[in-house]
Image (cartoon, grey):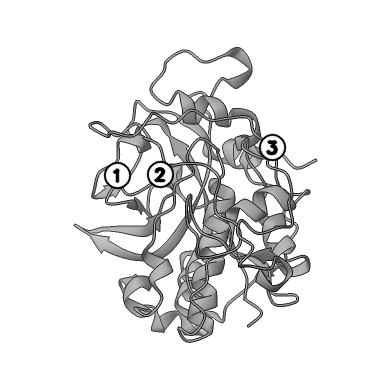
């Protein structure tokens, strides 16, 4: 059985990030837990092949890179999703990367959004609904079964829109209702929200044999982003990450890791001498730097723990 922390701890992490007391079965990690032990528990069993880029190309890697600037004709790269009252960052970050890569590899001709709602309901082997999921299996599902088009809550430009409304991810001054994770298990309904779309016609696919993981060396991740577009990344979410506003984030000494989290990484750079990864979160644009963030590439406690990607069938 795959071991993935978000399946066990997600309710506590999302609904009670500021709390000091958690239900016994949802207790987060202790501060003293070593990172190598954390990685043992939170990294899913690897089912995808590992793609390796030619290391001779390392000299081509620039000091900074932003996929939004590299592919300005692909607006999905700069869009921020919202997991709402369903803990589905694993699904939202996956379909966001898939959407970006459709646009990038079609040279801007296919500006489609891949549906997180369809992935949540129809990937039986990768989803426990609003209590987490397995991103490696999600990429495999895209290749073998396909995922229909569809955007965020209320979006009518696609087959199946995300069913969970935006909420407040503990941002002071927000007028949105506070997020509270639901234990929903979306069902697989092979029908579009509107009769204007046909489910089978709206299916998108990953290219056969194209779903993969990346090794965790910086150069391999950078070459992948430069070559194929943003990637899906697995990180540890710390309690003080909810308070992030700007700059290069690294966990405070007195914080603790709560849960596994999945984000989209769109680039990298250096700020005030600190190398960072540039990422897009799924807590809507009120959070962080309009939904984006930078995390240190030097601090081991916030390192990327797994990277996933794939290529679209155009």
User: Which residue appears farthest toward the left when viewing the image?
Assistant: 272
User: Are discs 3 and 2 less than 8 Å apart at CB?
Assistant: no
Query: Seen in the image, is 152 located left or right of residue 186?
Result: left
Viewport quadrant of the C terminus: bottom right
Q: Residues within 10 Å of mark 1 (few under 14, many from 20)?
A: many
User: Are discs 1 and 3 less than 8 Å apart at CB?
Assistant: no
Q: Residue at x 59, y 21 (%)?
A: 26
**Separation of marks 2 and 1 at Cα, in angstroms:** 8 Å
Q: Quadrant of residue 239?
A: top left
Q: Nearer the viewer, residue 278 or 156?
A: 156
Q: Nearer the viewer, residue 189 or 83?
A: 189
Q: Nearer the viewer, residue 302 or 70?
A: 70
Residue bearing the label numbered 1: 286
Q: Kindly state the secondary structure of the residue where label 1 is placed.
A: loop
* Relative to 210, residue 296 above or below: above
Q: Which mark is residue 185?
A: 3
Q: Residues within 10 Å of mark 3 (few under 14, many from 20)?
A: some
Of labels 1 and 3, earlier in sequence is: 3
Of labels 3 and 2, earlier in sequence is: 3
**Separation of marks 1 and 3 at Cα, in angstroms:** 27 Å
In percent of width and height, residue 153 lies at 48, 49
Q: Select label 3 or label 2 by which is in front.
A: 3
In percent of width and height, residue 255 lies at 38, 28
User: Are discs 2 and 1 less than 8 Å apart at CB?
Assistant: yes
Residue bearing the label numbered 2: 283
In percent of width and height, residue 133 lies at 66, 44
* Relative to 152, residue 67 above or below: below
């Amino acid at each position: 059985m795959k071991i993935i922390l978000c399946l066990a701890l997600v309710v506590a992490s999302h609904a009670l990030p500021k709390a000091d007391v958690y239900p016994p079965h949802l207790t987060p990690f202790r501060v003293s837990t070593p990172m190598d032990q954390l990685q043992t528990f939170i990294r899913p069993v690897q089912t995808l092949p590992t793609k390796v880029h030619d290391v001779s190309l390392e000299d081509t890697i620039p000091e900074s890179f932003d996929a939004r600037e590299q592919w300005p004709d692909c607006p999905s790269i700069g869009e921020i999703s919202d997991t709402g009252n369903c803990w589905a960052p694993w699904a939202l970050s996956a379909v966001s990367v898939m959407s970006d890569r459709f646009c990038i590899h079609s040279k801007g001709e296919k500006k489609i959004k891949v549906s997180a709602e369809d992935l949540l309901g129809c990937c039986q082997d990768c989803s426990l609904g609003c209590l987490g999921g397995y991103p490696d299996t999600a990429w495999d599902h895209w290749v073998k079964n396909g995922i229909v088009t569809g955007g965020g809550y209320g979006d009518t430009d696609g087959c199946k829109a995300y069913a969970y409304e935006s909420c407040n991810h503990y941002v002071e001054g927000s007028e949105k209702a506070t997020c509270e994770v639901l234990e929903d298990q979306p069902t697989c309904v092979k029908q579009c929200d509107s009769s204007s779309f046909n489910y089978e016609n709206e299916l998108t696919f990953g290219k056969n044999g194209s779903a993969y993981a990346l090794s965790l060396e910086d150069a391999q991740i950078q070459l992948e982003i430069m070559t194929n577009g943003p990637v899906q990344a697995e990180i540890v979410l710390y309690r003080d990450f909810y308070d992030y506003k700007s700059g290069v984030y690294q966990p405070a000494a007195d914080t603790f890791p709560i849960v596994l989290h999945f984000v989209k990484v769109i680039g990298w750079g250096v700020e005030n001498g600190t190398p960072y990864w540039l990422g897009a979160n799924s807590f809507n644009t009120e959070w962080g730097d309009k939904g984006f963030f930078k995390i240190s590439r030097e601090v081991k406690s916030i390192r990327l723990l797994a990277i996933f990607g794939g290529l679209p069938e155009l």
